Amino acid sequence: MKAIVAYIKPHKLESVTLALHHVEGLSGVSVSDVRGFGRGRAGGAPHTIKEGLADFIPHVRLEIVCRDALVEPIVETIRREAHTGLRGDGKIFVWPVEDAVRISTGERGEVAV
């Protein structure tokens, strides 16, 4: 199993999630609104400053846990749909997941995802 975490621009969320619905076997996606900055340090972008804190840009964080075989179709779908060609489109990270447990049934491993 793998965990996929993607940070994308908020206006791309709808097209990314609509495209993910077409990935056969995808069991679900969690979405969070987040703020942060990358290498550009939010330069030139609309920003907010709160009491001397750094400038942060709003992004959306997608979290997906899936079988190994689904990683490439999911990553490619997110990459394709989130791409605008502009700086700051986001990032996708993938790492191994040791175990998963479905709370309601106690199932473990891939069947719990």
Image: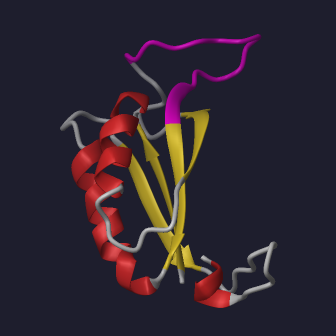
Q: Is residue 22 left or right of residue 5?
A: left
**Residue 33, percent across and down?**
59, 34
| 47 part of magenta stretch | yes
Query: In screen coordinates, is 69 left or right of 29?
Result: left
Q: Nearer the viewer, residue 110 or 63?
A: 110
- Image coordinates of residue 84 in percent, x first then y, are 21, 36
Where's residue 65, x and y in %? 55, 70
Q: Residue furthest left?
A: 85
Does residue 6 belong to the magenta stretch?
A: no
Task: Name above or below for residue 95 compared with residue 45.
Answer: below
Query: Disc count in the image?
Result: 0
Instruction: Name the quadrant of the N terminus.
Output: bottom right
Give the residue displayed 37% in from the left and 28% down from the top. 11
Q: Which residues are magenta?
A: 44-59
* Residue 30 image point, x, y percent: 58, 52
Most foreground residue, 86 or 63: 63
Q: Which quarter of the rendered picture does the C terminus lie within?
A: bottom right
The outermost residue toward the front is 105
Q: Which residue does the image show at 77% across and 10% down from the upper left?
A: 51
- Judge from the rendering whether residue 29 lies leftward or rightward of residue 68; answer left or right: right
Is the magenta region chiefly helix, strand or loop? loop
Judge whether residue 109 can be spotted in this image.
Answer: yes
Residue at 51% across / 26% down in the picture? 57
| Displayed quadrant of residue 97 | bottom right
Viewer-proximal residue, 110 or 78?
A: 110
